[in-house]
Amino acid sequence: MKTTDTLPRQPKTRTRQLTLIGLMTAVLCILGPLSIPLPVSPVPITLTNLAIFFAVYLLDIKGGTICLLVYLCLGTAGLPVFSSFSGGLGKLAGPTGGYLIGFLFLALIQGFLMKLFPKKNTAAVIGMILGMAVCYLFGTAWLALQLELTFPAALSIGVLPYLAGDGAKIVIAAVAGPKLRTAVHRAAGYLIS
């Protein structure tokens, strides 16, 4: 005997959202350890912030922040997911710990502006710029404290060498992020408006 469903099937958005959070956490864990050390700074060049930009594009404020929190927990627990394949509480307490904590504010600020203005890519760009500024602020303050530097001295080794590269990452995310979001959500079966 054949039975028919009278209720329309609802997409399993929670499962899809959790799957995307897991996938973007994996992307963060893969890109985070890849780093280029600079001789003038204890802060290496990484792709972590680019991965965060994409995570927020794909997952929104809540999912992007959860993704980043899982990444930080994995690294704090000792998995080698932070720069230079390092992990552990010592990394958070070390000179680059302020930047790692600042990444939370990056995800929150970018996600907040994207939620406030969902159809405006300029809001995402402004969110990335403001989020990076707050991340730089946390990172520089912590770097100055750890290395016993003045704030301007910490700024000169912890921010200035990275501005051009981070600007390029923002441009890449602003161009590719909306396209990636549409493609991934289409593939995942989300309704795209």
Image (tube, helix red, strand yellow):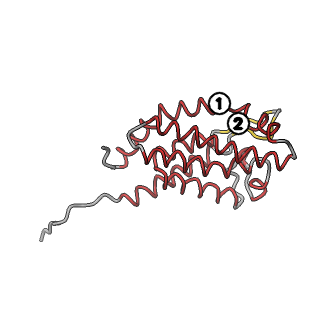
Measuring from the top left, give residue 87's x and y in whole percent: 73, 54
User: Based on the displayed image, in which of its 4 quarters is residue 155 positioned?
Assistant: top right
Residue contact at pointers 1 and 2, CB within 8 angstroms = yes
Badge 1 crowding class, 10 Å Cα cut-off, few under 14, some 14 to 19, many 20 or more, is few
Q: Nearer the viewer, mark 1 or mark 2?
A: 1
User: Based on the displayed image, in which of its 4 quarters is residue 47 positioned?
Assistant: top right
Query: What type is the residue that disc 2 sits on?
Result: Ile
- Residue 105 is left or right of residue 190, and the answer is right
- Residue 121 is left or right of residue 71, and the answer is left
Which label was assigned to residue 4? none
Q: Identify the residue at image location x=33%, y=49%.
A: 189
Badge 2 marks a residue whose secondary structure is: strand
Which label was assigned to residue 165? 1
User: Based on the displayed image, in which of its 4 quarters is residue 152 positioned?
Assistant: top right
Measuring from the top left, give residue 76's x and y in whole percent: 70, 59
Disc 1 from disc 2: Cα separation: 8 Å
Compare residues 9 and 111 and report the one nearer the observer. 111
Q: Identify the residue at image location x=41%, y=35%.
A: 179
In terms of sequence position, does the residue under pointer 1 or pointer 2 come before the other? 2
Badge 2 crowding class, 10 Å Cα cut-off, few under 14, some 14 to 19, many 20 or more, is many
Compare residues 8 and 122 and report the one nearer the observer. 122
Q: Which residue is label 2 attached to? A: 45
Measuring from the top left, give residue 159's x and y in whole percent: 72, 36
Query: What type is the residue that disc 1 sits on?
Result: Gly
Q: Residue furthest right?
A: 148
Q: Is the C terminus in the top left, top right, bottom left or bottom right quadrant?
A: top left
